Amino acid sequence: RGDTADFDSEVESICPFCGVGCQISMKIKDNKVKYVEGINGPANEGRLCVKGRFGFDYIHHDHRLTKPLIRRDDAPAKGLNVDPGNYLEVFREATWDEALERAANGLRAIGGTGVAGFGSAKCTNEEAYLFQKIIRQGFGHNNVDHCTRLCHASSVSALLENVGSGAVSATFNEIENADVAIVIGANPIENHPVAATYFKQFTKRGGKLIVMDPRGQALKRHSSHMLQFRPGTDVSMLNAIMHVIVEEELYDQQYIEAYTENWEAEKAHLKDFTPEKMAEICGIDAETLRDVARTFAGANAAMIFWGMGVSQHIHGTDNSRCLISLALMTGHVGRPGAGLHPLRGQNNVQGASDAGLIPMFLPDYQSVTDDGVRSAFTEVWESGDFSAQKGLTVTEILDAVHAGDIRGMYILGENPAMSDPDVEHARDALAKLDHLVVQDIFITETANFADVILPAAAFAEKAGTVTNTNRQVQMGRPAVTPPGEAKPDWWIEVELAKRLGLEWSYTSPADVFAEMKLNMKSLDNITWERLEQQNAVTYPSLSPEDPGQAIVFADGFPRADGRARFTPASIIAPDDTPDAEYPMILTTGRQLEHWHTGSMTRRSTVLDAVEPEANCSLHPSTLRKLGVEPGEFVRLTTKRGSIEIMARMDRAVSPDMVFLPFAYVEAAANILTNPAVDPYGKIPEFKFSAVRVEAAKTA
Ligand code: SF4
């Protein structure tokens, strides 16, 4: 931190990393961000974590793309073989005109369902909206998706099914009005650090925090109950808790009668899930399950927070259905301190989903199969109809590339060559494409496979809105100019769309936002001008003066009959269970210092200095058994592949488990992960693979 002499100007914006959406002030000197401070945003009240405070200098990294690039005619075969700091042996520099023409012509030549798109949860709402519009209007179908498929797709599918809305019912800050909270399958101290500060404050003033996670974690120290259940057994544990609530009649009959449906079926379904029987499956003793049931049901107001540990399973939708049922039967929804909150991951995964960057929904989760909905959009777009068929998801699109059905892709800000399960399958698909256009700020692993690379502005270099986990639409502002010829994503999308033959005339993100409002009721009473003045407005906002509703569903649910639904869930085993050959369980996730595939945080000086090397975590007894000292290497092998990686000792990981962060290309976690998906959300089972762990020869 410096004083005012250290900077020429300051710009208020949003931290570009996680879905908490902390507001920041960037201090600028000589077109460089010198340092960052937290300001008084609704989600952070001045607080920042290490990424928000110190993780900004990636924007000035010398790997930044500064000119459009086109693959050279004499480039080596497509593969993971490009040095991001020295790429001119593979790509040649081009003018914007040439690169955009080449990008558009290649996509046009393939055309129709032969082309698919991955947009980005790191871009703004306006950019996400334009991206889905390019695919729908330009190619006539819905084969467009983004990383929500890899994160909370199963939660959203359960929420839409049972409460009629995919967003949170209460902001995380509402925990200050709760007396009990469950945090399950989430590690907020590492992944939503500023939200975690509110959770810790809640326990300091006497709130009971029930943490449920197969991996121990830092929040355990603050918990009243820590349930370290067996991986993949969420449904058995949650059904046992609900069984007790039914058995002891701790449910809220009045609420159930007034606001829900299918209760009798849920009640009957839960009969068999006795805590004694379920304890044998989930590993949590029956008395603890009973105590948790009484504590949660007995609360005046209780909240449930969940993360990828719940959603990234082949039974992720069932896991979320259980959490929704638990909240409904106890009436812990729609009141201060009560609610359902899937902690969203990326800075704008909520907004990108809201903006229609998904294959089954147009903006505001309006179904592509509904003729009236499609015609409302084509009227605004002044264009013909597009397919009424739901599009393909992220993993389905890559399968379709292997099948030869998709030959061209436009990928904006996503990195499937690192982020997809069984990543060699994804990399082979990218190499197989006839035409790949990648738009990004660095030569990512995915850009290695590109035919055309369009250099984009970083978040601190452009204007646009983003929506955080709390449903808060917030204004991002440009603080510095992009390097070289890099351009804001919205500008590149508009120029590409024009060359695809679309008559787009947007001249600013504000133009796009104005169009979004025409078919997005969620943005009622939220205008660009208002966001410029106020920085943030929560949706829904009931009037131009209303700062927005922190809590929704007080008077019923946005379903046809206004009632939420109980959907019973049965036990489904993980897809890839341990056996003699692969006896342990692999689970993957993030670390505090690194963000997703590491393209930004591994180029941030402070963050990379704190956490510089690929590592996995193993229990001390496992390391002893292997004869491996902390800091030495182990080999991890699954049915998909094998990596060697430095081992760390971690008592929080159970002896039959290995935890593997996925930010490191040199030991890419997704070489190992299982592509099997949840049938509803189509989300892969990143959280459970059978694995063999051995001492590496290099140890
Ligand atoms: Fe940024 Fe999330 Fe940290 Fe806030 S908690 S500073 S949004 S990474």
Image (cartoon, rainbow, N blue to C red):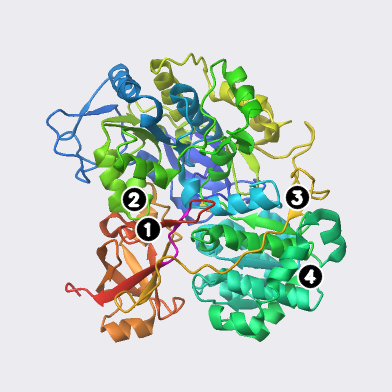
Compare residues 659 and 25 and report the one nearer the observer.
659
Please tell me which of labels 2 and 3 falls first in the chain.
2
Dot 4 or dot 1, earlier in sequence: 4
Q: Position of residue 341 (x, y in %)?
A: 65, 56
Q: Foreground: 132 or 58?
A: 132
> 13 above or below 254?
above
Q: Is mark 3 within 8 Å of ligand 1?
A: no
Q: Viewed as shown, does residue 677 lie left or right of 540? A: left
Query: Which residue is disc 2 drawn over?
Result: 418
State which tag comes first along the sequence, 1 or 2: 2
* Residue type, label 1: Phe
Q: Nearer the viewer, residue 573 or 522?
A: 573
Residue furthest out toward the left: 74
Labels 1 & 2 near each other (Cβ < 8 A): yes
Quote the CA–CA distance across marks 4 and 1.
37 Å
For badge 2, the amino acid type reads Met
Please tell me how crowded label 3 is: few (under 14), some (14-19), or many (20+) other residues with Cα within 10 Å: many
Give the distance between the C-alpha atoms of the residues marked 2 and 4, in whole angstroms.
43 Å
Instruction: Give the residues drawn in magenta, as a range.
Output: 683-688
- Say whether residue 687 is magenta: yes
Q: Which residue is mark 1?
A: 662
Reply yes or no: does residue 366 show up in magenta.
Answer: no
